[in-house]
Image (spheres, coloured by chain):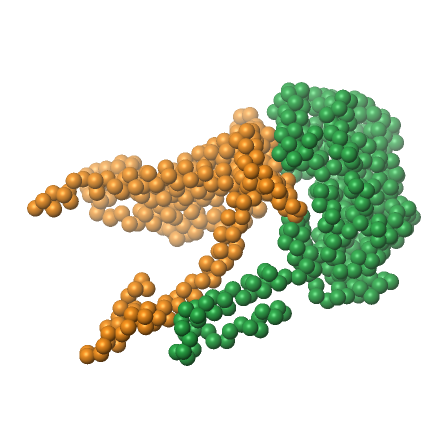
Chain colours: A orange, B green
Amino acid sequence: MTAAPPALDEGRTLSPGAAPRDPRARRRRRRRETLPLYLAISPFYLLFAIFGLFPILFSIVLSFTDWDGMGDISFVGLAQYQFLVTDERFWNAVGNTFIIWFLSTVPMLFLAMVIAFLLHQNIRFTPFYRVAFFLPNVTSMVAMAIVFGSVFSDTFGLVNSALTALGLDAVPWLSSPWGIKVTIAAMVIWRFTGYNAIIYLAGLQSIPTDLYDAARVDGASLMQVFFRITVPLMRPIILFTVITSTIGGLSLFTEPQVLLGNGGGAGEAGMTIVLYQYNQAFTQFDFGYGSAIAWALFLIAAVFAVINWRLVSGRGDGPARRPRAPKEARR
Amino acid sequence: MSPLSTVRPRRLPPSGPPGPRPSRRALLAGAAGLLPLAASGCGSPETISSDPSELVMWYWNRSASPELLDVAAGGIPGTDMHVRADVIGTSFDTKLRTSLAGKAYIPDITYINSNNALYFTNEDLFLDLGELGADAVKGDFYEWKWDLGTTPTGRFCFFPLDIGPTGFFYRQDVFEEAGLPSSPDEVSAAITTWQDWIALGTELKSAAEAFMVNDAQNIYEGVLNSSPERYFDAEDTALYLQDGSAVREAWDVTVAAIEAGLTARIPRDRGTDQNAAWSSGRTAGNIGAAWWTQVLAESAPDTEGAWRLASQPVRAGNNGGSFAALPHTCKDPEAALEFLMWINSPENQALAYEDVQLFPSTPDSFTDLSYSGTFFGDQDPLDFFSTAAETVPTSFISTWETMISGTFTFEITNVETSGKDPERAWEDALSQAERVLTKRGVEA
């Protein structure tokens, strides 16, 4: 982008017959023109360097030390990582994170797709529904946790009142390992379904309508249209939401923290990786171990990034690998 | 403020004369951009206020009487210094640690919660108030509270603020209906040991289908908080590993109570459920500190008049209660200590109780105080807790305790909520505690 204006400039100032400027002056002038641009973007980079990059790099250092946050920092080598690989609480947190991620992502994306598909039909008040479905995403998490805590309360909650009214057994939502996970997953679903539905809706609107018209002429049912046309054409967008949901799922923190506190609930059934990291660093003041957990999470996230990347690039490479270009070259 | 800001170059690109080379200009511009950051980073002062007669104090909401702070803002009586009190919101400990680690913007006076043992390993960051003459007022305070402010090396770094003597809160109406002893004297007489307490709870359970407490952790901590012995002694001996330790005793009492079905199995992270249980009478009791009175009155206002206080089995314990400390960078330690002695004098603690319900750590405060509420019917909680405070034993809370106590409460909760075998839970707590201590470099 920055290359274009200097080129234009060059053309304007070079009058016929003028000797070519010496390259140093040209470089100088280009610098003078690009400098304001760099200055304009510099605040972000400066702030990022101080508040983003430095803490990240410092946490690498901290993960090899023992530090309580105010006294001397003592180097302990790989001790934190050795502790980590044998720490049952950490692996419990890893397991919880994946279970909650799975419990929330699959129903959430399916629901979002259905909602988007319905919103895409010619129904009245579409803008109203769009806002209504997006609203949970911008609702205060703390308020939400109080509501969910009351709704899923074991003895006095709405859900259990409804279950017992229907003649079913009450479920100990907030004190059993699965109940806790389902409740957190429900919070995630409630909060992010609308967000994903809006993204899907944008994707749906980019699918040409003649495809639907053709399907309708051929007598396809609504279900057939959905599964044979909508879903296949939406694949890149679905992939995008899967990736963002994976990122969100791996860094799940707010929902369990506001619902269950820093301890992760009964039996630590709601302890996620990031909550465990926060717990160790900011309630136990074990910053070395907290940093080690953060970098373990980084490794786990990196594995998922590779899987995602393979998924995406695998599809992208498909057509390019066809031996078409060589054929053309031969001609 | 910083001298650096005066050399900030005025010539900012690109309007300058053509003379200087752009590279230098870029350098200058970059430096100009960095200046405010440099000024705030490298040249930052150790203390917060540059006013030599101003002491900055950090506290949190309702940990000091606003009325008294107003007086100190005009001047600490007997000195020419004044106090600027800043309310520090959440993550108090993290913020204090950050300022101490960064050696910048450290308050001159800081309040510290009952987790003051966390700071023992870095006690050199705080001044020894004994050296400054704090012993002159030692006789005014409950001895056990004063001792909690003393580090294992014998330095008195943490000045007593309020205390949290404990008792057994119970619903008189529920006890009465169940045909159990119901007046405070009767209940106190019926529960002089924990075994008696469990027996009474068993009767309550069968007669009224009500629980004694909401969670097992409440019993475990209630027992331990009333014990002179805790996890470690001041020489770092791991007392909890010895046969017949106080920790093991608290554990056994709690397991017996769980097995008798005395707990409602509502862990404390579920405050809504806990409050509902107390309001409805499903849970008819709680082992709580003096400050819990306000918590209860606010969360279960409909139960006013139904609650009474009975003496805890064996003896009263202490739960909570804050301290004040002077960081080593304090501008004027003498005046700061003068402030602490003034704001914590028996008269002023009585005033603070009336103002923000801080329970006084000086016995003499109670001569000035009277209670007029009806939350406990005709029972006077001030009288109850000030009597309880007399029996709180002297104990020692170790830094290492703060690192491992969570594993014990975690495992006792497992026994309670998921039916884990108590002996296995105990072994798991011990091995997890050992792992944590080894990692933190402590030999147990």
Given residues A125 and B118, the one toward you in this image is B118
Residue A63 appears left or right of B133: left
Number of numbered discs present? Answer: 0
Is B251 located above or below residue B22 in the figure? above
Q: Residue furthest toward the left?
A: A331
- The C terminus of chain B - image quarter: top right
Q: Position of residue B380 (x, y in %)?
A: 86, 42
- Residue at 69 percent of width and 31 percent of height: B443
In this view of the protein, can residue A212 be seen by the observer?
yes
- Residue at 77 percent of width and 25 percent of height: B245
Q: Quadrant of residue B146?
A: top right
Residue A27 appears left or right of A277: left
Given residues B260 and B236, the one toward you in this image is B236
Is B25 located above or below residue A240 in the figure? below
- The N terminus of chain B - image quarter: bottom right
Q: Position of residue B171 (x, y in %)?
A: 77, 33
Residue B321 appears left or right of A222: right
- Residue at 32 percent of width and 41 percent of height: A312
Q: Quadrant of residue B69?
A: bottom right
In this view of the protein, can residue B113 be seen by the observer?
no
Given residues A282 and B252, the one toward you in this image is A282
Q: Position of residue B354 (x, y in %)?
A: 82, 52
Q: Position of residue B30 (x, y in %)?
A: 47, 66
Given residues A129 and A308, the one toward you in this image is A308
- Residue at 55 percent of width and 73 percent of height: B7
